[in-house]
Each structure stands twice: as C-alpha cells, then as structure tokens.
Image: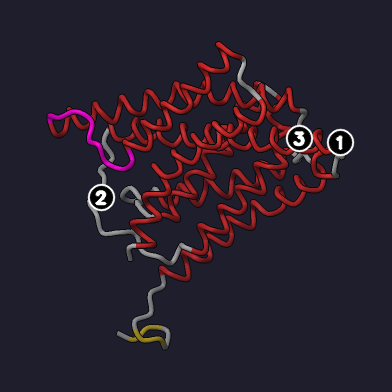
Amino acid sequence: MRQSGVIGYNPVVPATLAFNLLAVATLVPAAVVALRRGQVPVALAALALGGAVAWTVLQLSGPWPTGFSAALWLTIAATLAIGGALAAVDRRLMSLAILVFPYLAALGALATIWSRVPASTGAVAPWTGWFVVHVLFAVATYSLATLAALAGVAVLIQQHALKLRRQTAFSRLLPAVSVAEALEFRLLVACEVVLGMGLASGTAIEYVEQGTGAVLDHKTVFSALAFIAIGFLLLAHRRSGLRGRRAAHWALAGYLLLTLAYPGVKFVRDVLMT
C-alpha cells in the first residue's frame, strides 16, 4: 500500500521518534544547568518531569508496553517523580541533581535510539489489580536504586578527590561525603523494603493466576540477588559501620543486578535477540 509517496509507510514510527525527541528535549535544559551549577531550578525540573511523564502516560494509554525504550522512559518518569517527592521532604537530595538529571537525559537519549526497535511479540500483560501493584513496586524499587547508586557515585568521586587532595569544579558541586552516604543508605533502606514487597507481590500473582509459587526466571533471580546484596550491605553497615568506597561498590552492585532484572532482560529480548 502506498501512503505519502512511500511504499509501506508507517506513520507510527516517525511519530514515536518525534515524541521521544520532544521528551528528551525537556530533559536537556535541566541536565545542562545541573552540570554547570549543581542545582536545578524548580521550573526546569518540572519541565523535565512533565515531558517524561507525558510521554510515558501516552505509551501506557493502551496495553502494557513491553519494549526496552518504554521501560527506560517509565524509569525516567518514576525516578524524577519519586526523587522530587523525596526532595520535598529531605532537601539534601537536591544536591544529587548534578548526577541525576544528566544520567536521566542519557537514558532518554538511549531510549530514543532504540525507540524504533519493536517490542518482542510476547504475551501482553493485562491491567489487573495485582499486576498494577506489582509494577508499582518494581518501578519504585528501580527508581530508588537509581538514586541510591548515584549517591554512591558521588561518594566515590568525592573520596577520590580527597585522596588526591585536589577538588575539581565538578566535585565541588557534589554533596559532601557524609551527606552522600546518608542519602545512599536512606535510599537503600527504602529500596530494600519496596523490593521485598515486589518479590512478595510477584509470588502472589503466580499463586493467584497459576496456583504455583515464585517462578525462577531471570527477573526473579536477579531481583532476589539484589535483595540479598542490599540486605548484606545494610546489615554490614549497621553491625560493622561499613561505609565509603566499599559500601558504594555494594550499592552499585545491587543496582547492576536490578538493571539486569528489569531493563536488562528487555534489552536482551528486544534488541540483542531481534
């Protein structure tokens, strides 16, 4: 069929790309200002949140999107929303803006690059009560882990600068080690609690729908390993005072495991295996 002078023309592809680019464009100003000043004005933060949420909601208007690009945008929107809500309670979290906004802008660019890759043709999850609850736990977990990992990165950068006894323009904009560590552990505690609820809800879904317990697929295994790794870090911190570089490395390891559990599985399925 010929449309607009192009054989097999699909208007969805350029429309999707345009929406992706528009959403990324709302993230860029906040990322640039964060890198220059270390802080982001409320107006730019709201613009970034609005763009990411609008595009994510548009993708969620139909059946649950299972693609890699959609997963990244859901992560970006949730991280901005949760980060903003937490920053309203603990303003110290705003000191991580220099890492959060550039990182999320980079994720948005990655989501745009892969937006033309079709999602795998698997079963489309229905919008049921248990499914929505489980997704909310999963998204909140990964968003909290993202923020905790970035706090860990701030710790690593600051401790490296202290070791060299030379601060850079970038490190001066980061929170102090004590502040970054406090944020890191508070976020990890919240992440561990929500992750535990997510694992429990996933088991409940399998029991209600299939009459079985937890299914040991890649997502469940990596999520369980992340739960163990984060739990070990929190226990070691409480009992032996583990902190600094070693704690930051454990936090990043937990984030890596959750990345493999959530967007990583989608990347392998939708990108590497297509």
> Is disc 3 in contact with disc 1, using a CB cutoff of under 8 Å?
no
For the magenta stretch, what is the residue range?
Answer: 211-219
Q: Residue furthest bottom?
A: 5
Find disc 1 in the rendering and name its residue. 165
Q: Residues within 10 Å of mark 3 (few under 14, many from 20)?
A: many
Find disc 3 in the rendering and name its residue. 158
> Is disc 1 in contact with disc 2, using a CB cutoff of under 8 Å?
no
Q: Is residue 120 above or below residue 72?
A: below
Q: Nearer the viewer, mark 3 or mark 1?
A: 1
Find disc 2 in the rendering and name its residue. 124
Q: Is residue 220 left or right of residue 207?
A: right
Q: Is residue 100 left or right of residue 223?
A: right
- In the figure, residue 147 lies in which quadrant? top right
Q: Residues within 10 Å of mark 2 (few under 14, many from 20)?
A: few
Tell me which label, 3 or 1, sits earlier in the chain.
Answer: 3
Tell me if residue 20 is in the magenta stretch. no
Tell me which label, 1 or 2, sits earlier in the chain.
Answer: 2
Q: How many marks?
A: 3
Tell me if residue 217 is in the magenta stretch. yes
Q: Is residue 99 above or below residue 272?
A: above
Q: Nearer the viewer, mark 3 or mark 2?
A: 3
Q: Is residue 176 above or below residue 78?
A: above
Circle 3 SS class: helix
Image quadrant containing the N terminus? bottom left
Label 1 is placed on what type of residue?
Answer: Arg
Q: Residue at x 53, y 60 (%)?
A: 20
Image quadrant containing the C terminus? bottom left
Where residue 134 sits in the image (x, y, percent)?
34, 32
